[in-house]
Image (spheres, grey):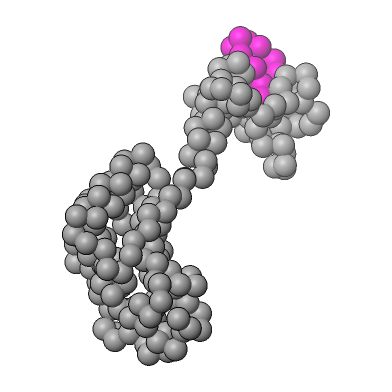
Amino acid sequence: MGDCIAREYRSNQRIRATTVRVIDEDDAQLGIMSRDDALQLAQQKELDLVEVAPAADPPVCRILDYGRFRYVQSKKESEAKKAQKSVALREVRLRPGIGAHDQEAKLKKVHKLLDTGAKVKMSVVFRGRSITHPEIGVSLLKKMAESLQNEAKLEKAPTMEGRSLSIVLMPTGKRDGPELDAELSTTDINQHNGNIESTGESVSKESQHAKT
């Protein structure tokens, strides 16, 4: 359970309400009764009376084993905390003119990162006049993503960030090729907002006015 501690609930004599709605250990609704009657009932069963919904009118109490209840709650909170941990984002950079051998090396690196559960940002970095041909970057990212379609899905569509064109992939189960292909094959770069928009095969000529 680590350092995760279950929240405290009012129980038994610590319950302040004089009237409560009671649910027993088998989830049976016992109705509304005085706190003292509910406490007596819990004691007869050698269990505790625990206030689980103090904001209700009247407050809801359960008859249960408070020690076990706190253990279960602590375990649930610990698991929820683990699930909320941020997933690492790693970046793999490519050049527009990258060769086949280097592509394979980059793919192997992405494979390893995805296997660790990390998200991967794949970026095509443009230098000089290569920025005037962003469609080359789109084509390269599409090819790389297609090679990973059985183990990753597209979390973030192609986006221009300065002189880089990037996508973000996240690890997942098997994904149909046509679905991923459709997200990357019809693209148009909008230089004003930096996004790749699904507006057709053509690449906006606005990006060609970027400074070299």
Give the side of residue 2 with respect to residue 14, left or right.
left
The residue at 66%/11% (across/down) is 43
Tell me: residue 13, above or below residue 20. Answer: above
**Quadrant containing the C terminus in the rendered view:** bottom left
Can residue 37 be spotted in the picture? no
Residue 81 occupies quadrant: top right
Tell whether position 44 is magenta. Answer: yes
Give the side of residue 7 with respect to residue 122, left or right.
right
Tell me: residue 106, above or below residue 188. Answer: above
**135 or 79, nearer to the observer:** 135
Give the side of residue 87 with respect to residue 140, left or right.
right
Residue 44 occupies quadrant: top right
The residue at 53%/22% (across/down) is 1
The residue at 70%/42% (across/down) is 56
Q: Position of residue 87 (x, y in %)?
A: 47, 45
Q: Position of residue 135 (x, y in %)?
A: 30, 78
**185 or 9, nearer to the observer:** 185
Q: Position of residue 75 (x, y in %)?
A: 52, 26
Q: Position of residue 98 (x, y in %)?
A: 26, 63
Can residue 106 be spotted in the picture? yes
Tell me: residue 23, above or below residue 208. Answer: above
Number of numbered discs on residues: 0
- Find the magenta span and give its range: 39-50
Tell whether position 107 is magenta. Answer: no
